[in-house]
Amino acid sequence: MKIIYCANVRMPTEKAHGIQIMKTCEALVACGYEVELLVPDRKTSIPEDAFSYYGVSQTFSIRRLQVMDTVSFGTVGFYAETLSFSWAVRKYLGSASFDLLYSRDELVLRFQTPPYVWESHTGAWSSVARVVAERAKRMIVISQGLKDFYIARGVSAEKICVAHDGVDLEAFAHPESKEVARTRLGLPQDASIAMYIGRLDGWKGIDTFLEASAHMKDIQCVIIGGEPHQVEELSRRYPQVRFLGAHPYRALANNMAAADVLVLPNTGKDEISVSFTSPLKLFAYMTSGIPIVASDLPSIREVVDDTAAYLVPPDDAHALADGIQKAIAGGNARAEEARTRVVEYSWKRRVERIMA
């Protein structure tokens, strides 16, 4: 079976969806499918090719379609680029040989001819999303909360498959030592370190972690990620926090090794965060054997509970600080439970569930 995956994203991109798309394509090939990834030919600030940037084997092809690269012009520019890409995809598919079209982009699928599979991540339910949900051969969602959302809006439960996000277990199997990781990152060897890795905007809850840092005098808070202007601004506002900037995804396992606690402070004020998300960083954290402190939200509890992580009320800096301190003092029992469970969340197992 040949699968064409179309994704209206810059490739590579610093955003997590780039990882998810590339790893899904790699896993599809590992399960015996032929895969071609269609992306728009847009400018990216990352000089590396997508395969090396994400540490993905070059077992599938990436085809870049010519588009109007107008996303930087705001909403109008985004829709112009999306329309441009949608028609480029339609034109390409008209002469391509394939068995199944797969995409996360309902705006792109709206212009394509079924059969196709729509993978939804955010609870989209516009007039476009309704048409795509009706026409889709199957819908893939990344949480039970998302499945419940679509069932409540009339989509057949039998049509929807829940497939949480995943992780490449082999890529995270042999991280460097804590001492080597701290030396490389310029972090103190004798400090207790609470680390957050990821973007610094949206519903990630980073403000709660930054506020919590003021309540932990004996713990060094470290953040890896963020745009340069965000890092510069937040470094001035929170001098007690170490901001290390963005690092390539392939360095994630080694960067996590420098931490004593890994933090996932998602907000409880956004429906995506509360019910819909399946955070890639959670699965990466679970491979590390390092205690996890995360917001106590339904989306998080679909994957871990109090035996595998320290769950704290969201948007509560004092509770987060207390949870981090308990995690440092509490040993590795929960971290080892998390590492046992994460085996069920490999990218290959995810694809096997989807294709079944």
Image (cartoon, rainbow, N blue to C red):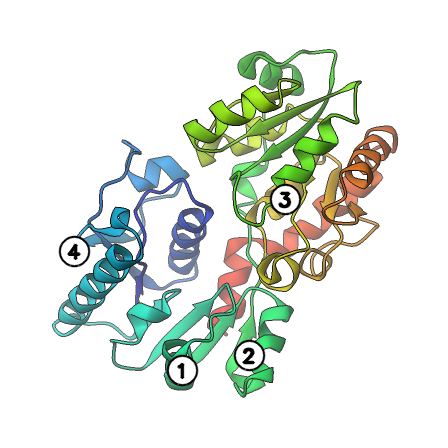
How crowded pointer 1 is (Cα within 10 Å; few <14, some 14-19, many 20+) is rated as some
Q: Secondary structure at mark 3?
A: loop
Q: Tell which circle, 3 or 2, labels the residue nearer the N-terminal end.
A: 2
Is residue 243 visible in the rendered image? The answer is no
Image location (x, y in percent) of residue 323 = 82, 38
Q: CA distance from mark 3 to mark 2?
A: 26 Å
Q: Secondary structure at mark 1?
A: loop
Q: CA distance from mark 4 to mark 3?
A: 34 Å
Whether 40 is drawn above or below 192: the answer is below
| Label at residue 67 | 4
Question: To which residue does mark 1 refer?
Answer: 137
Question: To which residue does mark 2 refer?
Answer: 150
Q: CA distance from mark 1 to mark 3?
A: 35 Å
- Asked if the residues shown at circle 2 and circle 4 are in contact, with their CB atoms under 8 angstroms apart, the answer is no
Q: Tell which circle, 4 or 3, labels the residue nearer the N-terminal end.
A: 4
Say which quarter of the image contains residue 30: bottom left
Question: To which residue does mark 3 refer?
Answer: 205
Image location (x, y in percent) of residue 37 = 28, 57
Q: CA distance from mark 2 to mark 4?
A: 32 Å
* Quadrant location, the N terminus: bottom left
* Three-letter code, disc 3: Gly
Question: Residue at point 49% right, 71% down?
Answer: 140
Question: Residue at point 53% right, 48% down?
Answer: 202
* Three-letter code, disc 4: Val
Q: Which one is closest to the eye, mark 4 or mark 3?
A: 3
* Three-letter code, disc 2: Tyr
